[in-house]
Amino acid sequence: MRNTMTAAERKLWFEFLREHHLRWLRQKPLGNYIVDFYCSEIQVVIEVDGDSHYTDDAQEYDVQRTAFLQGYELQVIRFTNNEVLDYFESVCERIEQLCKR
């Protein structure tokens, strides 16, 4: 677990998820993993990926991690730091669409 959030995680948390009508948790342990954001009501995990996720090893790890989470019928949605910072409204709209299903 990290005590400090990235700028993108901080923006998403403080400007959207923290006061959202559904309860979101941050840095939630699930199995051997810690996810960035989790909502049990809709069974959704949100991951905000920085540059470290673009190495071959990290991408393989993310595939295994996503498969594990999907095995528990969780939907995993990923955004890059840049998406959150540069296209914040679109990111929020995508999350809202998941909340309406």
Image: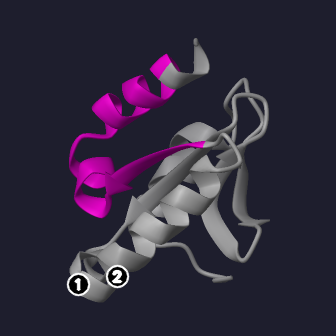
Mark 2 neighbour density, 10 Å: few (under 14) some (14–19) many (20 or more): few
Mark 1 neighbour density, 10 Å: few (under 14) some (14–19) many (20 or more): few
**Do residues under tags 2 and 1 come within 8 Å of each other at their CB atoms?**
yes
Badge 2 element: helix
Tell me the number on the disc at residue 55.
Answer: 1
Q: At which x and y percent is residue 55?
A: 23, 84
Residue marked by disc 2:
58
Q: At which x and y percent is residue 26?
A: 69, 59
- In depth, the one of 26 and 10 nearer the eye is 26
Q: Quadrant of the N terminus?
A: bottom right
Q: State the residue at coordinates (31%, 83%).
A: 52
State the extent of the magenta-drawn residues as a range: 75-97
Is 80 on the left or on the right of 33, as rendered?
Answer: left
Badge 1 element: loop
Q: State the residue at coordinates (36%, 36%).
A: 91
Q: At which x and y percent is residue 29?
A: 76, 68
Q: State the residue at coordinates (63%, 83%).
A: 2
Is 10 on the left or on the right of 82, as rendered?
Answer: right
Tell me the number on the disc at residue 91.
Answer: none
| Residue 27, quarter of picture | bottom right
Q: State the residue at coordinates (59%, 21%).
A: 99
Q: How is the image coloured?
A: one colour
Mark 2–mark 1 distance (CA, rounded to whole Å)? 5 Å
Looking at the rendered structure, the kind of residue marked 2 is Ala
